[in-house]
Image: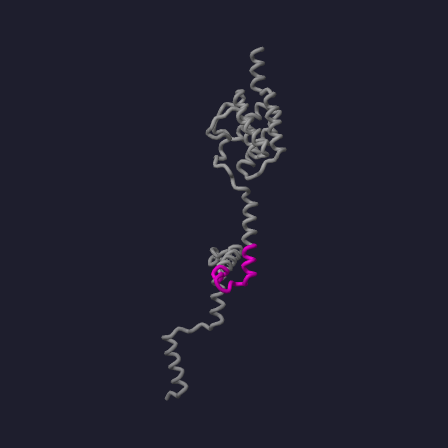
Amino acid sequence: MTGAGGTTAGLLIRAGEDIPVDVPRLPAREAARDELSDPMYHEHDPNLLERGLDRFWEWIGDLFAGASGAAPGGPLGLVVLVLVLAALGAALWWRLGTPRRTARSPETLFDSTTRSAEDHRAAAAAHAEHRRWTEAVQERMRALVRSLEDRAVLDPRPGRTADEAASEAGRLMPAHADRLRTAARLFDDVTYGGRTADEAAYTTLCTLDLDLQAAKPLLTTVAARGATG
C-alpha cells in the first residue's frame, strides 16, 4: 500500500523526467555576467571619448529641439552652447591656420605664367610698398629661383618646388645652402601653411637674392679650372 507521501514522491519523480531542472536565479545571473565580461563581446564598443562626444551631441540636439519651447538648461544652456561652438571654431582655426588664398598646387613654385626674374622682383617690391609681406616674400622667392635659372645655375623646370630649387642650388652654392633651405621653408609656410610673413622675412629674401647674384656656383668654378688646366 502506498501512502500519500509515496504518491507525492512518485509524482515529483515523474515530473522530473519530463521537465528540466531549473537553475536558481542568482547563479544564472552570475554565469551570464561572467560570460558577457569576455572582451570579445566589447571589442567594438565606443571608447570613453566617443561616448563623451555622443553625449555632447545628444545635449546639443536637445537644446535645438527645445529651442522653440523650454530648452534644456534654459537661456544659460544656449549661452554655454554658443561659447562651446565658438571655442571649437577657434581651435580649428588655430589648428588649420588661415584659409589658403591660392588654388595653386603645393607641388609647384611657379604658376603657368612665365615671367622674368625682374618681373618677379618688381611684383615683390609693389607688394612690399603696400606692406603685403606674404605676397612680397612669395614673389621674391620666385625671382631668386628664376634668376638662378637665367644664369644656368638651375635648369628651367616648371614643376620645380621651392625645396627642390633650394636643394639643387645649395649643392652648387654650399656657402648659401642653409639660407636657401630657410628661404624655401619660409615660402612653403606662407604659401601652403597658412602663416603670415613680415617685413623681416621679406628683407631676408631680398638679401639672399642679392648675395646669390654675386656668388659663383661650383659648376662655373670647375668649368673654368678645366679650361685653364
- Name the spot of residue 102 as percent of width and height, x first: 50, 36
- In the rendered image, the quadrant that contains the N terminus is bottom left
Looking at this view, is 131 or 148 the one in front?
Answer: 131
Quarter of the image for residue 153 reads: top right
- In the rendered image, the quadrant that contains the C terminus is top right
- Name the spot of residue 115 as percent of width and height, x first: 50, 25
- Name the spot of residue 194 as percent of width and height, x first: 55, 39
**Residue at the location (53% across, 37% down)?**
192
**Residue at the location (58% across, 33% down)?**
130
**Residue at the location (56% across, 15% down)?**
223
Q: Looking at the image, is 165 positioned above or below residue 216?
A: below
- Name the spot of residue 7 as percent of width and height, x first: 38, 85
Looking at this view, is 115 or 179 the one in front?
Answer: 115
Q: Is residue 137 magenta?
A: no
Q: Residue furthest right?
A: 200
Q: Residue furthest top?
A: 228
In the image, which residues are magenta? 62-83
Q: Looking at the image, is 69 positioned above or below residue 125?
A: below
199 to the left or right of 42 = right
26 to the left or right of 12 = right
Total marks shown come to: 0
Q: Is residue 69 magenta?
A: yes
Q: Looking at the image, is 91 positioned above or below residue 227?
A: below
Looking at this view, is 68 or 178 the one in front?
Answer: 68
Q: Which scheme is used to colour this image of the protein?
A: one colour
Q: Looking at the image, is 121 positioned above or below residue 132?
A: above
From the image, give the main secondary structure of the stretch colored magenta.
helix
